[in-house]
Amino acid sequence: AVLLPKRRLHVIQGTHEVTDDPEVMLTTILGSCVAACIRDPSTGVGGMNHFLLPEAPDPGQGHRRYGVQAMELLINGLLALGARRHRLEAKLFGGARMSTTMADIGLRNAEFARRFLADERIPLVGESLGGSKARRVQYWPAMGRAQQQLVTDPTIMDRERSSSRELVVKSGEVELF
């Protein structure tokens, strides 16, 4: 069944969203980037981030586009809304190899995200990582439900980078995951 949220927030590269509103759906489009969807199932508080690279090239350069900062900002945002660290659970998406001629950034992102969650003792309850296609991900934090659709249109990534935070909801555009 397709779930139609009242509000849909789009998470672009280098950002994150957290919510305790059961009627919000978070969405993003990923290539080699990774999104972590983390929630506290007892409170319904959840969120999503979207990071570009596992770590900054210069260790002193902290920025939310990088894995560690993106994960810390997301977790801190969840805790600020009442989530409890010991109840957090996660789903990971993205990490595709978008080019066979360049380094496999997607694999590095996926490995980082799995390692971070293991180090922080946050259970990984679902994932869709790797492959060679971009993904559109939709996540309902209150329920912990995620859907994804593989993206075949190569221009979708360019449109995603310039899209706004809040989108109009259209019915019938999601495939169950």
Image: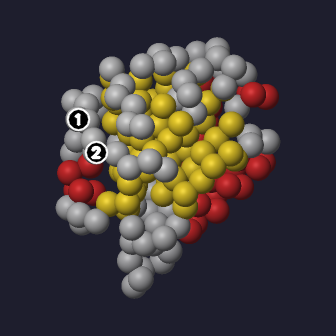
Identify the element where label 2 is drawn: loop
User: Which label is found at residue 7?
Assistant: none
Q: Nearer the viewer, residue 146 or 49?
A: 146
Question: Does residue 22 sit above or below 134 in this rendering?
Answer: above
Percent x, y for residue 163? 22, 41
Image quarter hosting the N terminus: top left
Residue under label 1, please give it: 170
Q: Residues within 10 Å of mark 2 (few under 14, many from 20)?
A: few
Task: Indicate left or right for 59 with 14 as reference.
Answer: right
Name the colour scheme. secondary structure
Residue type at numbered disc 1: Lys
- C-beta proximity under 8 Å, tags 1 and 2: yes
| Residue furthest front in the image | 1
> Circle 1: is it few (<14), some (14-19), or many (20+) Cα within 10 Å?
few
Position of residue 172 measured from the top left corner of the image (x, y, whole percent) = 27, 41
In this figure, which residue is indicated by the disc labeled 2? 173
